[in-house]
Image (spheres, rainbow, N blue to C red):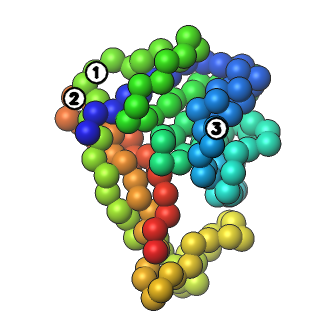
Amino acid sequence: MRGFVYSEYLDKESLMRLIEEFFRGESAFHISQDIISYKPEEGLPSEIPHRGQVFSEKGEMRWEGDGKYLVVLLSESEFATGELAPLGGGWSVEEKKVYLTPPDAPHVSPKFKKYPTQVNNNVPKLVVHVYYRDSVATFVSPRRFEG
């Protein structure tokens, strides 16, 4: 399938407005990241951390910065906004499912409290979209959890 990738530097208010606009009505997850923590949570973020991401079936938005944020939007649909510019190249997308390691596995020490558990005796999977730029894998974008 065809992919669309956009990027630009935005201030905090513009980033929050864009997140709310793009993910309106979506069942989304957000992840705030720092050096010692990686916290996936349901819903949209209430504030913009230094580094984070939001994803849903519709797409994923990532950012990093302090005051001005480098923002990347990954989607399978065009998103017309004057705030983000399309990244050049021929973008294609492939959907894949990756298995999630159980948090009680001896080699895992998750830094978050809520984690997908087995559903109907199935190991949970994270559905991701792999973005290829001119046939080179460039991004792995989470989309949803499956049992």
Residue ID at (59%, 46%): 26
The residue that label 2 is drawn on is 134
Read off the residue under disc 1: 89
Residue 49 horizontal side relative to residue 121, left or right: right
Q: Residue furthest right?
A: 46
Q: Secondary structure at mark 2?
A: loop
Residue 54 is marked as: none
**What residue is pinned by disc 3?**
24
The answer to the question of whether label 2 and label 3 lie on touching residues, with beta carbons closer than 8 A, is no
**Labels 1, 3: front one:** 3
Task: Confirm whether residue 29 shows in the render.
Answer: yes
What is the x, y in percent for residue 3?
A: 33, 33
Q: Residue at x 62, y 71 (%)?
A: 115
In the image, residue 143 above or below residue 51: below
Q: Check the image and name the residue furthest to the left.
A: 135
Q: Position of residue 53 (x, y in %)?
A: 60, 42
Identity of the amino acid at label 2? Asp
Real-space CA distance between mark 2 and mark 1, rounded to the nearest whole angstrom: 6 Å
